[in-house]
Amino acid sequence: MAPAFPPARSTLRSLPAWLRRKAAQFLSSGLGPGKLALTLALGVTLGVLPLLWGTTLLCVVAAFLFRLNQGAMQIINYLSYPLQFALLIPYYRLGGFLFPGNAGPSLQPVSSSTLLADAGTATLKAVGAWGLTAPAVALVVYAVSLPLLRSALRRRDRERSATG
């Protein structure tokens, strides 16, 4: 059984390796490479949803439904935030292109209710664009991460059997 804390005589150089091992144990928590790849794919896909709220709750629901690691799902979701912000404008533009309607912004003064309605419509269009691209994103992330995770887990198992 591993110690609860790194040994006192350890150097700062060994601390990151210890943290990496503990993080890997926590995040994998008995999941095989398929479930880990699914966690990664769903976490990234839901994490880039063009809404500035709700991705955490959607990740909780997805992890519960697919019996995935909640902690890993949320970490992936939170790490996806920069990508979410980077994709906001492209998703809004794609939504406007795919679902035309409304003349768009004008230089005329508008009421706050009109502004909110236009923002709501634009957000729905962006979510629609995300909904059309999300399955492809999830499949690509899954297909790329699965062989990488299998290889990493095989390498870890070989290292364990060599040292144990």
Image (cartoon, rainbow, N blue to C red):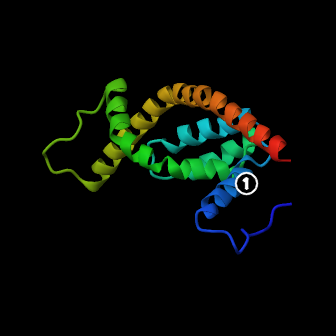
Look at the image and tell me whether residue 149 can be seen: yes
Q: Residue furthest left?
A: 107
Which residue does the image show at 68% across and 60% down from the upper left? 18
Quadrant of the snapshot with the N terminus? bottom right
- In the rendered image, residue 37, in percent from the top left (x then y), is placed at 66, 35
Q: Is residue 55 above or below residue 146?
A: below
Along the line of sight, which residue is nearer the eye, 75 or 163? 163
Along the line of sight, which residue is nearer the eye, 27 or 93? 27
- Quarter of the figure with residue 102: top left
Which residue does the image show at 63% across and 64% down from the upper left? 15
- Quarter of the figure with residue 161: top right
SS at badge 1: helix
Tally of marks? 1
Along the line of sight, which residue is nearer the eye, 148 or 61? 148
| Side (left or right) of 38 relative to 119 | right
| Side (left or right) of 122 relative to 77 | left
Which residue does the image show at 60% across and 35% down from the upper left? 41
The 10 Å Cα crowd at callout 1, few under 14, some 14 to 19, many 20 or more, is few
- In the rendered image, residue 22, in percent from the top left (x then y), is placed at 71, 57
| Side (left or right) of 155 relative to 160 | left
Residue under numbered circle 1:
26
- Quarter of the figure with residue 144: top right
What amino acid is at disc 1? Phe
- In the rendered image, residue 82, in percent from the top left (x then y), is placed at 42, 49
Along the line of sight, which residue is nearer the eye, 76 or 110? 76
Q: Is residue 158 above or below residue 52?
A: above
| Side (left or right) of 55 relative to 115 | right
Look at the image and tell me whether residue 54 can be seen: no
